[in-house]
Amino acid sequence: MSIQTETTTDTAPYVGRPVERLDGPAKVSGQARFAAENHYPDMAYAALVHATIARGRIAAIDTAAACAVPDVIAVLTHENAPAMIPAPKLSLLDLSTVASATSVNYLATDEVHWNGQPVAVVVAETWETARHAASLVDLSYEELPAVVDFAAEAPNAVPERSMPLMPSKADKGKAAQALADAPFSVDLQFSTPPHNHNAIEPHATTAVWDGDQLTLHEPAQNIPWLRKHLAKRFGIPEEAVRIISPFVGGAFGGKSRAWPGVLIAAMAARATGRPVRLALTRAGVYHTVGGRTPSTQRVALGADAQGKLTALIHTSVSRTGRVGGMAEPITAASRHLYAVPNIHLSQRSVELDLLSNTFMRAPGEAIGTFALESAVDELAWRMGMDPIALRMLNEPDRDPAGGQRFTHRMLREAYTRGAENFGWHQRDPRAGARRDGPWLVGMGVATAYHPSMRMPASVTLRLHADGTVVMRCGMHEMGMGSATVQAQIVADEMGVPLASVHVEYGDSDLPPSAGAIGSVQTASVAAGVIAASTMLKRSLLTLARRAPGSPLRGRKLEDLQARDSGLHHPDGGQTYAEILSAAGRDHLEAAFKPSMLGFVARMAIDSRRWVTGASGAQFCEVRVNADTGEIRVSRWLGVFDVGTVINPRTAASQLRGGIIMGIGAALSEQTLIDGRTGRIMNPSLSEYHVPVHADIPHIDVDWLNEPDPTTPLGMHGIGEVGITGVAAAVANAIRHATGKRVVDLPITLDKLL
Amino acid sequence: MTLIRMNVNGSAKSLEIEPRVSLLDALRERLGVTGPKKGCDQGACGACTVLADGRRINACLALAIQYDGCQITTIEGVDHPLQEAFVRHDGFQCGYCTPGQICSAIGMLSEYEAGMPSAVTDSGGLGEAEIRERMSGNVCRCGAYNGIVGAIMDVAGSDAR
Ligand code: FES
Ligand code: FES
């Protein structure tokens, strides 16, 4: 979709317009300050020492050489560090417990639970000194046997509990029998490697104590969870923790929990009485922040002679860490995509002596859709059917696993539009049929799917006498354009120019937002904005009706329109400025605070009534060099059903970003773990290959823009749906180009030779 | 400790500095010039790109003392149509790689003008492939590549072709 430059006049409606990012000028001029860019006089620098074994005990730790380095302030180890209160255990009654990234009480135990666990921290006057001294800390260990090899351990997997709120399992009919009886079938085994987020901003904390008050500059995806977690760990009230996080340099799930760095930074600052900056090295991020689980998956499909699916089996094995981590909904999308009478979905997992796995962009769905959508494509090959026709034929009317109705489902329309615009009908259905010099050219498709959810978010709106509206919400900006899209919504709801809206965000002093996780933030905060706007307009009307002679006397809010910075009726209205000045007020405020209990109850009821998700059709063209196996993605189109799009400019970037991360997963990304030592062998951006400019062609994205009747303004979250289906679309295009089905990610050229 | 003098964004700076301090850390931690970002500290991401006497370099791979007497331009000292073009084309999301992308693009355009070839140089003009190749040292994990290339094409179209 090409985006027109914003030229229209500055009046509502703003929703649906490609407004430029409000923080754009700050980001292109170096004025946007990230967490590691706040300076304090007297600030010290910290560097971590990481364990070099996977499991065991520290037999001895010698810090003499490190302490002797001039300008070293402290070397904290389990022998002298002040102990933190242990991390709270996961409880569904308090979702902030999800912030407990591991159960290890860092620097309060001699136990080592993963290769890379922090075992000491050096605090010094400069970063260079801290890092050098950290290299001088001498450790010896008593090693214990460790289980770190996922592939070797996978056969011992045990059934696992679903991730909270995200069911992955299903059993309907007799899937195994139906598969055995089916005239056409596929039964494939897939594998996907571990991935790391690799946000370009490494995690960095600047921690400052003032008595028992803790202030942190920290890139955070979930300020309320982190705040609560820190308060518990340091035994101080929540109000005593301030988290400032106006800009987050990418996160993708990696900044949603309390990983060791932030805790040790705060501990070191308290122990030394100095403001402390702990900026992780890139390798330090790999060693102390979890990533996506590896998986092995089986997908088996049975179909009748016409291509109607009769059986769907999708099972997975993934891993957690013995010290933490949780199930990722790998088979979850398979609940929703195909009308099949017999379904079996189940997940198993193993516990390894590695750092906890954690959420990474579309946890579960990103890799689950690779297996499912590759298998569907392979079935189409076996049946000699067009893969889009096969999908259309099996498009369900109701949720296949749960039987609920869909609030919104337009996959057929997405495929139809995509096929048309991508030139699918020119595709020669034979494998390897199209050649351009040394290049074999192929096209593939796959379905994208991500559930649509919301969490409670508090929002305050304050209207000033000059007509400006200040929105306050401690939401997170990691690149989604949070402030911009919410300002658009505020401007529309209040009927004021966009330039009159100011958005305050990224600070625990503000009303608590929903986390920027699970694609929930934009819709969740929008719900808060709408509720707060209604409250504010109601209060304005109440004020106006008290004033004698107001044209709004006797009016109900339902009969009024908020526009031109006022409340209006065809027979007359008043501007907000007039209402406030008549009432002698210089401002008016409305604060919306949702109740968690009511929210959870509502969610439970809704999930029984209907299923809501964002979906899409991913179209990929690849060129594979017949001699070398080199694979280039040459064209892409994603057509999405994501409900109302608030801002086409930022939405396109979000969807493209997901697709590009998916191309990385398809072709190059993998975290390599030494099966003997549990050590990550490629903890760097030079050896973990994320896509670069030259890997990525023009990515076309498009959307149907039909509102969902059950969501705020009809929108779905779009942060994650973009990555789903991508790896399968690439694999399917490669299958078309070369005739080879690759079932193991990443699809490197050796797998084609 | 060594005394060095640099001109940073038009103002003269002198620093007593250890030889091991990188140019990036000197800028960010000693001079408070935080526009250049640290993404990897090992030359793999380009977030730290600055212009040294007009040439693009990875400031994390440079020792500050090597740049004694040099003119350093960071994003704070840039005033270039690319900046506005990045906003228009949405050439970023989180914005962390952006200072490096912009400084790198400026350096890249002058390399191109000076006739320096790249691995894909064979045909006429600064097309998309040429830009992608020459910008591949600047990683954007948010995946804003389309917008970045669009912004560069836009600006180069008017003054570099
Ligand atoms: S920080 Fe210099 S290249 Fe990554
Ligand atoms: S904008 Fe986030 S890394 Fe490029």
Image (cartoon, coloured by chain):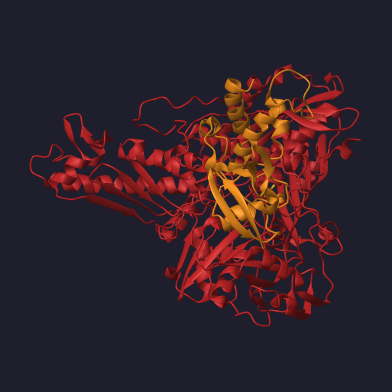
Chain colours: A red, B orange
- Compared with A412, A607 (above or below) is below
Q: Position of residue A700 (x, y in %)?
A: 62, 28
Asked if residue A588 is positioned above or below residue A244 in the image, the reply reads: above
Seen at 72% across and 69% down, the residue is A134
Give the answer, above or below, for where B83 lies relative to A204.
Answer: above
Does residue B90 appear left or right of residue A599 in this picture?
A: right
Q: Is A289 situated left or right of A60 in this image?
A: left
Quadrant for residue A537, please give it: top left
**Where residue A703 appears, x then y in whole percent?**
55, 30
Assign the N terminus of chain A to one quadrant of the image.
Answer: top right
In the rendered view, does A724 fall on the left or right side of A713?
A: right
Q: Residue at x 65, y 34 (%)?
A: B107
Check the image and report above or below for A683 versus A69.
above
Between residue A480 and residue A639, name the one nearer to us.
A480
Residue A495 place in picture, x, y as percent:
30, 36
Quadrant of image for the C terminus of chain A: top right
Q: In front here: A55 or B28? A: B28
Q: Image quadrant of residue A400?
A: top right
Q: Residue at x 82, y 27 (%)?
A: A737
* Residue A166 seen in the figure: no
- Extreme left residue here? A548
